[in-house]
Image (spheres, rainbow, N blue to C red):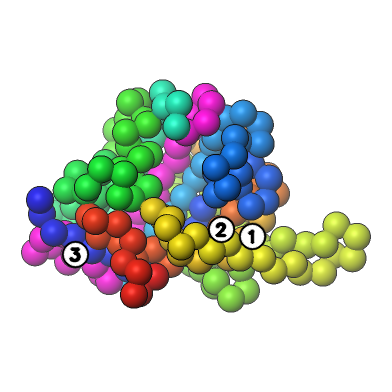
Amino acid sequence: MTPWEIDAMEIANCNCNFGCPCQFNSLPTHGNCEAAVGFIIKKGHFGDVRLDGVKFALTAKWPGPIHLGNGTIQLVVDTAVTPEQREAVEKIVTGSDTEDMATMFWVFSKMSPNKLETLTKRIDAQVDPEARTGYVRVADVFDLGVEPIRNPVTGAEHRARINLPHGFEYRVAEMASGTTQTSGAISLEKNKGTHAHICRIYMNGQGVIDHAA
């Protein structure tokens, strides 16, 4: 296998209630899963291909829980990437050069037999984990915004984290409220003021790198 490693920030929004039942081995809030996710690689490589500064995004939709499969997924890479970087990102996201079940990319790919064409689009993304704010704007595909969860009575910001010691996506993530508007091939219908998380993902083909995550 080609050795690879990425240290990136992730912003994700799905259609479930805050906290996301998947994180607790429970079924989706509405019975199905719809998500938009953006990644900003701070530092990384796939073999000899450097991935520093690369941005990519995903939209995905499953008719039921993710583990039952039959999902549809589409990868988008930023217009600034080189052909070699695009190929590297495609291999990581499709679970190539990755041990079975080691990363969420491997799982999402295996549970999504309906893979749409990889797009190259301008991706504008920014994230502030401490403030629980950020956005991912993918031209002609989706616009995702994240803000703090707020107390429904007082409006005060509420802060919560999830710690997954054995997670295949992250070790610690900040919980937030996310809204996604879609204009691409995959339409997300209920992602308004729903679960979002911001986290650092530090992983390779064997999974999350504990000493850094």
Q: Is residue 204 visible?
A: yes
**Left or right: 131 as drawn, with respect to 60:** right
* Mark earlier in primary sequence (2, 1): 1
Look at the numbered disc 2 and give the secondary structure of its residue.
strand
Distance from the alpha carbon under mark 2 to that under mark 1: 5 Å
In contact (CB < 8 Å): disc 2 and disc 1: yes
Give the residue type at disc 1. Ala
Q: Residue at x 31, y 44 (%)?
A: 101
Asked which quadrant contains residue 176, the reply is bottom right
* Mark earlier in primary sequence (2, 3): 3
In contact (CB < 8 Å): disc 2 and disc 3: no
Instruction: Measuring from the top left, give residue 99's x and y in whole percent.
Output: 22, 47
Give the residue type at disc 2. His
Look at the numbered disc 3 and give the secondary structure of its residue.
strand
Which residue is under mark 1?
176
Q: Quadrant of the C terminus?
A: bottom left
Please name whichever residue, 193 or 204, is drawn nearer the observer in this view of the structure: 204
Q: Residues within 10 Å of mark 1 (few under 14, many from 20)?
A: many
Give the residue type at disc 3. His
Instruction: Measuring from the top left, give residue 64's x and y in whole percent.
Output: 53, 26
Distance from the alpha carbon under mark 3 to that under mark 1: 29 Å
Which residue is under mark 2?
197
Q: Residue at x 49, y 60 (%)?
A: 164
For residue 45, the mark is 3
Residues in magenta?
Answer: 43-66
Q: Is residue 44 magenta?
A: yes
Q: Residues within 10 Å of mark 3 (few under 14, many from 20)?
A: some
